[in-house]
Image (cartoon, rainbow, N blue to C red):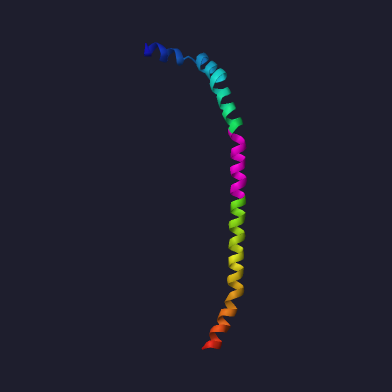
Amino acid sequence: MTHKMTSFFEKEHIQTAIRNKVLDPIMNHIVKRVFPYIILICVMFILLLISVLLTLGVILFKIRTATPMIATELTIVS
């Protein structure tokens, strides 16, 4: 029984028919349903990356501007 099934599904025209009539429509439906969520995830990732870079820039800017003040305060106290 399994030998008959495997020999049946090994035929090229059967594989083509299954691919065209079953697998391709299912995959197209899945891609159409999931694609908006993929775009949303990409946009959210880009926004997260931008916010991380902006936060890093602000932190570096504050450290740069605060360092001379700390150095002068330390020399005054000493």
Image quadrant in which you'd find residue 27: top right
Count every numbered label the image shows and give the total. 0
Q: Position of residue 11 (x, y in %)?
A: 48, 14
Q: Is residue 76 above or below residue 31?
A: below
Query: Which residue in the rendered view is the most extreme toward the front?
Result: 77
Q: Is residue 67 above or below residue 37?
A: below
Q: Is residue 54 above or below residue 41?
A: below
Image quadrant in which you'd find residue 62: bottom right
| Residue 35 is inside the magenta segment | yes
Q: Is residue 67 left or right of residue 3?
A: right
Residue pictured at 60% horizontal, 72% vertical: 64
| Residue 8 is inside the magenta segment | no
Residue pictured at 56% horizontal, 83% vertical: 73
The image quadrant where one finds the N terminus is top left
Q: Position of residue 6 (x, y in %)?
A: 41, 15
Q: Position of residue 48 (x, y in %)?
A: 59, 52
Return the residue nearer the eye: 78 or 15. Answer: 78
Residue pictured at 61% horizontal, 49% vertical: 46
Q: Is residue 71 left or right of residue 8?
A: right
Residue pictured at 54% horizontal, 17% vertical: 16
What main secondary structure does the magenta stretch of the protein show?
Answer: helix
Q: Position of residue 7 (x, y in %)?
A: 42, 13
Which range is magenta? Answer: 34-46
